Image (tube, rainbow, N blue to C red):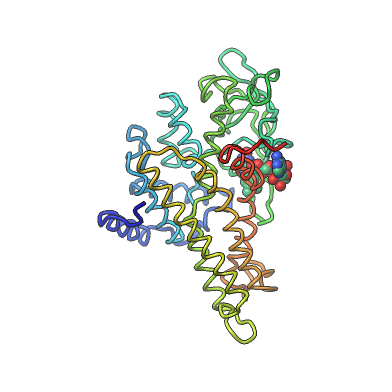
Amino acid sequence: MDLNFTPEEDEFRLKVRRFLEENIPKSGLGDGREGREDKAWLGRAKEWQRKLYEAGYVAMAWPKEFGGQALEPVRQSIVNDELVRAKAPYLIGGSGLGMLGPTLISWGTEEQKKRYLPKILTAEEIWCQGYSEPGSGSDLASLRTRAEIVGDEFVVNGQKVWTSGAQYSDMMFCLVRTDPEAPKHRGISYILIDMHAPGVTVRPLVQMTGDRGFNEVFFDNVRVPRKNLVGKLNEGWIVANATLFHERNMLGSASGSEQRFNRLLALAKSIQRNGRPLTEDAVFRQRLADLEIRVEAMRLHAMRQLTDQIRGRQPGIEAMINKLVGTELNHDLATAAMEAMGDDSLLARDEQSVLDKGYWPYEWMFSLGLVIGGGTSHIQKNIIAERGLKMPKSR
Ligand SMILES: Cc1cc2nc3c(=O)[nH]c(=O)nc-3n(C[C@H](O)[C@H](O)[C@H](O)COP(=O)(O)OP(=O)(O)OC[C@H]3O[C@@H](n4cnc5c(N)ncnc54)[C@H](O)[C@@H]3O)c2cc1C
């Protein structure tokens, strides 16, 4: 494994850094994760993604014919690092870029790729993920939303829940039951639903962060053209898993952990315990050392994966580890910060005396959501044990 970048890659990094210094929106977008509903915010968020895309920094590895540049993954990895380093707002089209896009590239028809991929890149169409339902989260294959075929259409009835960003999404990639008689994994299809179609109702839910990040979505006789089926009828489970694979990789991405660790370190230096900075407290130092080792392990793990990608190797068990380890690490970093702040961690974000601009309490709550979303840690452990280590199935 080569841990060095080439001179051209270093030069490219500087170019990206300069672009971000000059172009990151200075205000009015927050960090982009809050899931707001007002049109002005949405417009600014889309504009930011479009600007980044036009500069050539979005989905750079995608095929050229659909708006990508077919570049080596290392370029995108440099851009991702720089986005985190510059504290750039999250991309509003993240679900399309990170989940549906790569799935369509492997599983979509040519018509679907042409129709959807370019608008994902430019944020003209925002996507949400319709997997979870009341009673079907970890046991996703038990989902009950029905789609019946009537002529050239599916007619969809049922309910999804915890749908992130549905309130401002134009489209949903959705799992529906098309054969209720088949064993549960076999009667599912993967379809693309227009969120503006008659019969779709979205009801935002408030999270513990106070944000309206996710929603309930109801379908009442929603008509979906049959050409919006991805993969084969009743064989959507395999496509659904392809999307989950991309989602888990995206959620576990290591790049943010280094930044968070550095922020935690700065916080600990600024806090006094027994007349000394917290970084000189023997017990807290151990904690910091443990976290730094985990951050470094994730950085090296990401480099290993990048090397594999460059060499064209299929991702194996190492890709399954990302979600579990990356999301738990980020939550543990936030937990350490909360404990370092003690009672001050209870102050609201806008209190004058709040430490580190109120970043950590929000981050602590938000990062817990990512430990659960995309499949909980328990489920990741089961997958790693069963599919990665070939251990007997859990019951
Ligand atoms: C921030 C956030 C965003 C989300 N966004 C979306 C979205 O956009 N679209 C979408 O479809 N869904 C979304 N989800 C839903 C998410 O996928 C589910 O919450 C998750 O899969 C867990 O399902 P559940 O909430 O029904 O919990 P349950 O499945 O009811 O699990 C409850 C507990 O039991 C444990 N458990 C369950 N089964 C097992 C088992 N076999 N072995 C061991 N332990 C087990 C779980 O680990 C968990 O601790 C989001 C969730 C969060 C938190």
| Quadrant of res 67 | top left
Q: Residue at x 56, y 40 (%)?
A: 388
The C terminus sits in image quarter: top right
Q: Please state which of residues 93 and 175 is positioned toward the viewer in this rendering.
A: 175
Q: Quadrant of ligand 1?
A: top right
Q: Nearer the viewer, residue 135 or 42?
A: 135
Relative placement, left or right, of 117 versus 185 is: left
Q: Is residue 30 above or below residue 273?
A: above
Q: Is residue 163 visible?
A: no
Height in image: 389 above or below 26?
A: above
Residue 30, image x, y percentages:
53, 58
302 relative position to 75: left or right: right
* Position in image of residue 61 (x %, y %): 36, 41
The residue at 53%/42% (across/down) is 247
Residue 249 at x, y = what percent?
A: 51, 45
Q: Is residue 74 left or right of residue 375?
A: left
Towards the viewer: 73 or 364:
73
Residue 237 screen position, x and y as percent? 59, 28
